[in-house]
Amino acid sequence: MSETIEKPAPARNLPPLMTLTDRAAERLKRLYDGANKGQLLRIALSSRGCSGMSYDMSFVDAALGTDERVEDHGLTLLVDRKATLFLIGTVMDYEVKELESGFTFSNPNEKGRCGCGESFHV
């Protein structure tokens, strides 16, 4: 009897976990060079709000063993491994409006947001 050996499926190109816009990279670089020198931005998801999930950002001194490293625009940020499936393909931007400014996320996995914009669901 001859044994049939199956060839592995070719690897698919996956979208990057996250990318930064030029504005987000510029703002993050200023934070890394200033008040948060020596720290890294860590992005996680928490259960919060009326839609269920919310972005949670914090500056940390070191990566956890379970953090994924994202490199873009010559900068490093961390993503909680538990959040990776929900963030694949997300673009992080930095917006300045008349009364507020901050990082925003364009997440292709979002299926909807609550009315106030604080939370989302996938």
Image: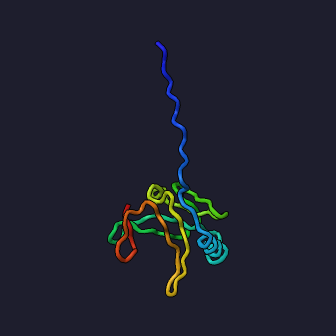
Q: Residue at x 35, y 72 (%)?
A: 114
Disc tally is 0
Q: Residue furthest top?
A: 1
Q: Residue furthest left?
A: 50
Q: Residue at x 59, y 71 (%)?
A: 24
Task: Pinpoint residue 51: horizontal percent, then vertical percent.
Answer: 34, 68
| Quarter where residue 70 is shown | bottom right
Task: Pinpoint residue 120: horizontal percent, then vertical percent.
Answer: 38, 67
Task: Pinpoint residue 1: horizontal percent, then vertical percent.
Answer: 46, 12
Task: Pinpoint residue 62: horizontal percent, then vertical percent.
Answer: 58, 63
Left/right of residue 110 with respect to residue 98 in the rendered view: left
Q: Nearer the viewer, residue 47 or 14?
A: 14
Q: Nearer the viewer, residue 102 or 69?
A: 102
* Location of residue 109 with respect to 105 vertically, above or below: above
Please identify the quadrant where the C terminus is shown.
Answer: bottom left
* Colour convention: rainbow
Q: Residue at x 37, y 66 (%)?
A: 112
Q: Residue at x 56, y 60 (%)?
A: 63
* Location of residue 30 with respect to 75 vertically, above or below: below
Q: Nearer the viewer, residue 59 or 90?
A: 90
